[in-house]
Image: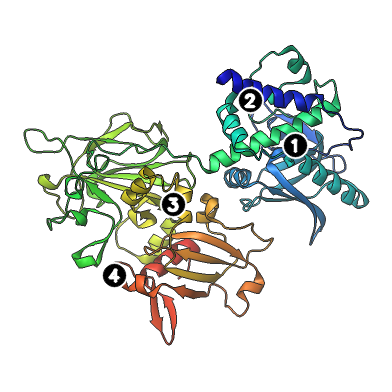
Amino acid sequence: MRNGLLMLCVATLLAGCQSRTATAPKPAVARFLLEAEADRTAAVTLPVSGVRLRVLPKPVILEYDIVNVELAQVELGRCLLFQLAPDAARDLSRLTAANHGRRLALLINDRPMGARVIDQPLLGGTVLVFCEVPDAELPGLVERLKRTTAELRSRQVDSGQKVGACLQAMDWGIRAVMLPANDCDRGRSRSHSNRLQAGSYFTGARDGEALMNRLRILPALLVLLAVHARAQRVELAWPAPNDAFTADHPISELLQHAGSGEAESGGFGGVRSGGGQFHEGVDIQPTKRDRRGEATDPVFAAMDGVVRHISLHPGKSSYGRYVVLEHPGVTPAIYTLYAHLAKVTTGLRLGATVSRGQTLGVMGRSASGYAIPKERAHLHFEMGLMVTRDFQRWYNARKFGSPNEQGIYNGMNLMGFDPLDFYRKHRARRVNNFQQYFDRMEPVVKLRIATTRTPDFVQRYPSLVTKDLPLMVAGWEIWCNWTGLPYRWTPLTGVDVVGMRPNQVRIIEVNQAEERRQRSKSLAVSRKGGWVPGEDLQTVLQQLFGLK
């Protein structure tokens, strides 16, 4: 079977290599390189201004990341507008958020042509850059760029059988497509990365036309990779040895009640005090105890991730001892939280990479401000999103009277969703990943806010943004689920917020039945025939936008 798949890819490759076209306009291949101060950098010099940049040799945006090129008119003149594919747009958002003040250098056919300063995170996959060529040449350059982009994206595989075969053969099929012409002829294998080194399309090829034909094949496989990644199934581990969930045992064998005797009180949501008290996660029972009756179950990382926070002093948080992981390998990059630990694994350090199923600590009953009896020891487990990196400003403004010991990983800055609901849907294959889960959330409140501010929440979770950002953001339309989690963001232009004052919030739709049913959260309050934000929604908006 593997040999058959290999022959399929080779046959496709050879068909591209052997085809000929009568004439082929000169391609215009655009790439972007990132300015850096590392040792292994290359120098590029812009042709008119003479500006000299030190850049990393590996492009951060490649030609097959680009879906369209247009000529744009801005206040300072005409520039090129590059629109990126969704996956590349998310990568660019993270890259630019982490490299503020550096520059992106534009190369066309490996010649430096322009640069732009990263003055803010680039959201929505749109890159504007001034090109150092005469204005009269810009329309022709744009046409060449558009034609090359269309060529690179023209070959789509429309047969389900080919899709399956290519996905199975992707690891070596793409490498075969990337081989230079002389390697195709000799049948030698060579290891290449997904992203080609700068200049590889224009060096080492004996026949330019054959090379362009190979480029027409490559995007088809790359498109398959993007589709495959979008539907990629997240690999999960249950965070505790209690297998009542996976064994379909009663919920009373899985969740630890909160003193009421009702297992549901250990679940997510308004499950306590008759539905009026909100619980951010799920409380999982232990399966083993020592002779003193203390829980001894290990606690596991739910996914591959990075350790972002460790609180070793139980008296400083109602979580007791707890660990927070961030999961940059999933979209959006959610956090998971593991609380009330008896102890944290020795050697676990901030910034350390952990693997799915790796032991983080031991289940326990540590807490602050209240006592958890040993018979109710449990793991408090959360999945969710962080609201803001500017949490301390909000915390100071509220004047709580005690210091914030946990920084941005204070529980008031973390908004969870139901872990058990996600695991159930994942297990039933109703969702494969977190983006699908968020896409299927139901809104309870839809609102608009007039603001030019782009919260860091959007910058950290760009997949929640529904469309490209305009040149000037004038506001946002935000959809919140019943807990107030802002899971869908649409940027607005000035036309969309006409008549609204700066920072004015206007609720445009409320699911009244659900809002009344969920008594543990107040998102919208009816007032004078309209709706205004309730207490919990006000808190979220204050944290996101700095509202008072």
Q: Do the residues labelled 3 and 2 touch (CB within 8 Å)?
A: no
| Left or right: 22 in relation to 403 | right
Could you tell me which residue is drawn at 77 percent across and 43 percent down? 149
Report crowding for label 1: few under 14, some 14 to 19, many 20 or more residues within 10 A (C-alpha).
many
Could you tell me which residue is drawn at 17 percent across and 34 percent down? 296
Percent from the top left, x then y, of residue 176? 67, 22
Q: Which of marks 4 and 2 is nearer the N terminus?
A: 2
Q: Farthest residue in the bottom direction?
A: 528
Distance from label 4 to label 2 (Cα)?
55 Å
Instruction: Give the residue type at disc 2.
Output: Gly
Distance from label 3 to label 1 (Cα)?
43 Å
Dot 3 corresponds to which residue? 437
Dot 2 corresponds to which residue? 173
Q: Viewer-proximal residue, 224 or 129?
A: 224
Q: Viewer-proximal residue, 259 or 170?
A: 170
Dot 1 corresponds to which residue? 53
Distance from label 1 to label 2 (Cα)?
36 Å
Q: Viewer-proximal residue, 496 or 242?
A: 242
Q: Nearer the viewer, mark 3 or mark 2?
A: 2
Q: Which of marks 4 and 1 is in front?
A: 4
Dot 4 corresponds to which residue? 519
Q: Do the residues labelled 1 and 2 touch (CB within 8 Å)?
A: no
Element under label 2? Answer: helix
Percent from the top left, x then y, of residue 143? 85, 48
- Dividing the picture into quadrants, the one containing residue 210 is top right
Distance from label 4 to label 1 (Cα)?
58 Å
Q: Which of marks 4 and 1 is nearer the N terminus?
A: 1
Q: Which of marks 4 and 3 is in front?
A: 3
Q: Viewer-proximal residue, 452 or 524?
A: 524
Percent from the top left, x then y, of residue 431? 43, 47
